[in-house]
Image (tube, grey):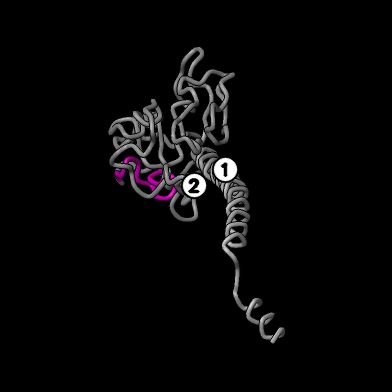
């Protein structure tokens, strides 16, 4: 009889107190693990953005090496005309960023902006084949300079190349060319009027390609 009572007690399962204790431990561990996991994921996104910016930047500089100009030609065939280039396969129809900025205004404007793919992946500045860079001679387009479409950043937004800084002549402004992601906060914190000492600002992520004297 005593053995039977022990078996019954052993088969009763968890008490309410035991269940509460287990749930409390699980919740405590979850509260510790989730922020740590989120932090690791964000670090991974930042590392990916830095690596992709370098790849895009290397492609832009290969283009410059071949042609002696930056990818800033417009649909009329005029070099050194564009101000801002976006990565990604298509031009956004609405701004994916969370605040306005000259990089965005230039890039989404019909006159001064374009997709980087139109210059590095295809030879169709502002989508116009008639404006193509030369493909014969020593100084010529030798693309494609990218293996497939240029990427959007890990937050789903285009990287921006402030190509204005490669050609615009000003005494103090537009001195540094960058490939930039707006980073986790989705806002560009880097000054568009870059002087020779302007750095990448806030949580923006990117790489500097070159600097004008």
Q: Nearer the viewer, residue 202 or 163?
A: 202
Helix, strand or loop at label 1? It is helix
- The picture quadrant where one finds residue 200 is top right
The magenta-colored residue range is 117-128
Residue with the most extreme front position: 1
Residue at the image position 28 percent from the left and 33 percent from the top: 110
Q: Which residue is mark 1?
A: 46
**Residue 5 counted in the magenta span:** no
Do callouts 1 and 2 mark residues in contact (Cβ within 8 Å)? Answer: yes
Identify residue for label 2. 154
Task: Give the tally of numbered discs.
Answer: 2
Q: Is residue 119 magenta?
A: yes
Measured from the top left, where is residue 96 in percent x and y?
36, 39
Q: Is residue 50 visible?
A: yes
Q: Residue at x 57, y 30 (%)?
A: 210
Taking the view exactly as shown, the residue that stands out farthest to the right is: 3
Give the crowd class for mark 2: few <14, some 14-19, many >=20 residues within 10 Å. Answer: some
Q: Position of residue 62 (x, y in %)?
A: 54, 43
- Residue drawn where x is 71% and y is 83% of the image: 2
């Amino acid at each position: 009889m005593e053995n039977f009572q022990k078996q019954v007690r052993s088969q009763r399962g968890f008490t309410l107190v035991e269940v509460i204790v287990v749930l409390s431990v699980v919740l405590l561990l979850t509260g510790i693990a989730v922020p740590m996991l989120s932090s690791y994921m964000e670090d991974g996104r930042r590392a990916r953005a830095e690596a992709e910016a370098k790849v895009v930047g290397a492609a832009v500089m290969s283009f410059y090496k071949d042609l002696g100009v930056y990818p800033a030609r417009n649909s009329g065939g005029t070099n050194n005309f564009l101000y801002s280039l976006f990565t990604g396969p298509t031009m956004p129809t609405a701004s994916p960023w969370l605040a306005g900025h000259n990089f965005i205004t230039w890039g989404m404007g019909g006159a001064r902006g374009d997709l980087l793919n139109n210059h590095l992946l295809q030879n169709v500045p502002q989508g116009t084949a008639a404006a193509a860079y030369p493909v014969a001679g020593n100084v010529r387009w030798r693309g494609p300079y990218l293996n497939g479409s240029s990427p959007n950043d890990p937050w789903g937004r285009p990287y921006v190349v402030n190509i204005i800084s490669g050609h615009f002549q000003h005494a103090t402004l537009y001195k540094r060319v960058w490939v930039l992601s707006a980073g986790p906060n989705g806002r560009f914190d880097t000054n568009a009027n870059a002087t020779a000492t302007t750095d990448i600002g806030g949580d923006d992520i990117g790489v500097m390609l070159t600097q004008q004297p």
